[in-house]
Image: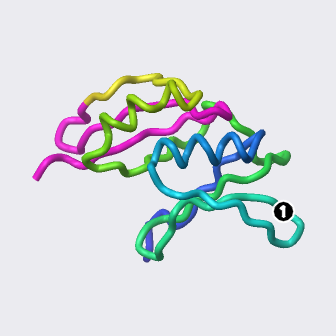
Amino acid sequence: MDNTLVWADIPVRDLERAMAFYAGLLDVPVHAQHEEGMDFAMLRHDGSNAAACLGPMDQYHQPGGGGPLIYLGLNDRLKEAEARVPALGGKVLEPLHTMGSHGSRVIIEDTEGNRLALYAPPAA
């Protein structure tokens, strides 16, 4: 498990709006949760992939384009997801392009102002 990304917090201003964006973009259910006085939502996590949490902002977690770039794997659904971004309220910052032998990506901005990459590995 060394050197493996296991969790990513994605800060949000509006949880319901962010849930609708990610559910529509990734074509997976996103369910709100409430634990220990905090409202948040989890993207699908089955133990074999890194978890991603849509969570409230605080002094350390603010939406924005700086900092690390989180890649969400979409495999053969990359073009379809790219086309959905504007209708869901996001922006395509860098259209679909290859990264040489490392696969392909689309860089987007979500409804909360976070910059993310949608990723597909190289074709086998």
Q: What element carries label 1?
A: strand
**In the image, residue 73 above or below residue 118:** below
Q: What stretch is highlighted in magenta?
A: 98-124
Indicate the position of residue 34 as horizontal and vertical percent values.
Answer: 80, 67
Q: In this view, does 33 lie to the left or right of 106?
A: right
Membership of 105 in magenta stretch:
yes
Q: In this view, does 97 lie to the left or right of 2?
A: left
Name the quadrant containing residue 88.
Answer: top right
Quickly name the residue at label 1.
38
User: Which image quarter is the N terminus in?
Assistant: bottom left
Name the quadrant containing residue 59.
Answer: top right
Query: Image point 40% across, 23% down: which residue?
Result: 94
**In the image, residue 115 above or below residue 9:** above
How many marks the image carries: the answer is 1
Which sits in the foreground, 6 or 33? 33
Indicate the position of residue 55 as horizontal and vertical percent values.
Answer: 73, 53
